[in-house]
Image (spheres, helix red, strand yellow):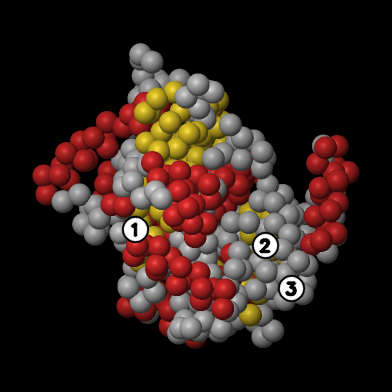
Amino acid sequence: MAGPKSLYEKVWEAHTVRTLPGGLTQLFIDLHLIHEVTSPQAFGMLRERGLRVRCPHRTFATVDHIVPTHRRTEPFEDPLADAMIQEIRKNTRDFGIPLFDLTSGRQGIVHVVGPEQGLTHPGMTIACGDSHTSTHGAFGAIAFGIGTTQVRDVLATQTLAVPKLKVRRINVNGRLAPGVYAKDVILHIIRTLGVKGGIGYAYEYGGEVIERFSMEERMTVCNMSIEGGARIGYVNPDEKTFAYLKGRPYAPKGAEWDRAVAYWRALASDPGCPYDDVVEIQAEEIAPTVTWGLNPGQAISIEEKIPHPEDLPPEARPAAWEALRHMKLEPGRPIQGTPIDVAFIGSCTNARVSDFREVAKHLKGHRVKPGVRAIAVPGSERVAQQCEEEGIAEVFREAGFEWRGAGCSLCLAMNPDKLEGDQLCASSSNRNFKGRQGSPTGRTVLMSPVMVAAAAVTGVISDAREVFGLA
C-alpha cells in the first residue's frame, strides 16, 4: 500500500511470510514468551510429532501463574503446581530455551519480565499463551495472546496464521487531574467503547496524555486492550521508549543500538496515515474509576452512583441485573462506602516499581483497617528487589500489607492466593469475572493501585483524592 502508513501496517508488512488460501496471514513471530500453564501441552504435541523448536533463541520462559507468593520453598504444597514447575524446567532444558526460574533474579510475571529484561522491542511481533500479551504494545510492538495449539505452532515454525485487523486510533488529549491514573484512563476507554467495542481492531493509543505517560503507564493501558475486545493495543515508539530500553540485559548494545533506534524511530505511524476509526477522549472527563459489575466495562467514576439496569440499553439489562445480584450491590446507591474484605495490589497490569512507588508515597503513615486483608505482590523478583532497596516494601509492611514474592497471585488465583466465600476485593488487576479470584461467589472491584490503598486503609471503597489529600 502506497502513501503514509500506520505502525501496524509497517510491522505487518515486514513480518508477512505469505497470504494463506483462506485469507489469513502467515506472520513471522520475533519473540515467543512462554510460561508454565499454557506450554506443557504444546511441548507434548511437539514430542508426539517428533518436532524441534524452530528458533529457541527467540523463545523465553518464566514461571508466574501457579507460583506461590508466600511460601516459595520447594516442593510446593500443591503437587500440581510442583509438577508444572518441574515440567517447564524439563521442557526448556530439552529444547534449549532460556528459563527465568525461581531465585534467578529474573523470574516474574511474563508481561513484566519481558520489558524489564529488554526483550520487548519496537516493531517486534510478539506472541504468548496469555491474553494480556497486548502489554508489550506499549513499546510499539504488535503483541497478542494465543492459545495452546498456537503455542505449539510458534514453537514448531516461528510463525502463526492470523487475521489482519483494522486499526482504531484513540486520542486522549488534555491533562489528567491529580489522583487520576493510567488505570482510570483504560477503564474509562473500555466503559466508553464497550467490552466488545474493539473486536476486529488493533488499538493505537495517542494524544497528549499517552505521550506524557511513562512506559509503565503505557503498559497499563495496552495491557487492558484485550478487556475492550481489541486483540492488540500499541503506542508509537518515541525517545521515552528508547530511554527505557537502553542498557537493559537483552537490549541491543553499541553500534547495534544506534541502528536499532534508527529503525525503531522510522516505525511510528506516518502523519496523515489512514485509520479505520478515530476516537477522541478528553482527559478532564476522567475521574478515578471503579467497576461495579462482572466485566471491566461495567465501570463508573467514584463520584457516580451504581447504575440502575432499567436505565441502560435493553440489551445490557440482563447482564447488569446478573452483575448486581452477584456483587450484592444496590442500584442507585453510591459505590463509595461499600465495605471491602481484601485489598490486592499486583498483576501484569499494576505490579511494577512505579505502581508501588506511587502508592508508598501516599500510604506512608497510614494503617490498613482492622479486618481487611491487604496483599502486595511485586510483578517480578527485580521489582521486589528495587522496592526493598528504596524502602518501599517496608512502607507497605508498616502499613499492614502482606509483602509477597513475585507472581500472578490473586489476579487469577491459580496459586494459594484466593478469595474465600463472597469476600469483596478491591483489586489493581485486570479482570472482575465471576470466580476470577478463586471463589465462585467472590467479588472483584477493579481500580488503580492508589485507590486500592485508599480502600485498604478506610475499609470501604473510597475516593483516594479525599483519603490521601490529592488535589
Q: CA distance from mark 3 to mark 1?
A: 43 Å
Q: Label 1: how many residues lie within 10 Å, few (<14), some (14-19) or many (20+)?
A: some
Q: Nearer the viewer, residue 314 or 78?
A: 78
Work out which quarter of the rendered image holds the N terminus and state it.
top left
* Three-letter amino acid code at the position of disc 3: Gln
- Which residue, given by chain and number where applicable, does mark 1 sit on? 95
Judged by depth in the image, the label closer to the viewer, 3 or 2, is 2
- For marks 3 and 2, the one nearer the N-term is 3
Q: Is residue 168 left or right of residue 19?
A: right
Judged by depth in the image, the label closer to the viewer, 3 or 1, is 1
Position above or below: 122 against 64: above
Position above or below: 106 against 184: below
Q: CA distance from mark 2 to mark 1?
A: 33 Å
Residue 340 visible to the viewer: no
- For marks 3 and 1, the one nearer the N-term is 1
Position above or below: 299 against 100: above
Residue 55: x and y in percent read 31, 47
* Three-letter amino acid code at the position of disc 1: Phe
* Three-letter amino acid code at the position of disc 2: Arg
Query: Looking at the rendering, which quadrant does residue 277 occupy?
Result: top right
Residue found at x 45% / y 48%:
49
Residue 438 visible to the viewer: yes
Outermost residue toward the top in this view:
2
SS label for mark 2: loop
Q: Nearer the viewer, residue 339 or 19?
A: 19
- Which residue, given by chain and number where applicable, does mark 2 sit on? 436
Residue 413: x and y in percent read 61, 68
Residue found at x 78% / y 67%:
441
Residue found at x 60% / y 75%:
417
Query: Looking at the rendering, which quadrant does residue 415 occupy?
Result: bottom right
- Which residue, given by chain and number where applicable, does mark 3 sit on? 423
Outermost residue toward the left in this view:
255
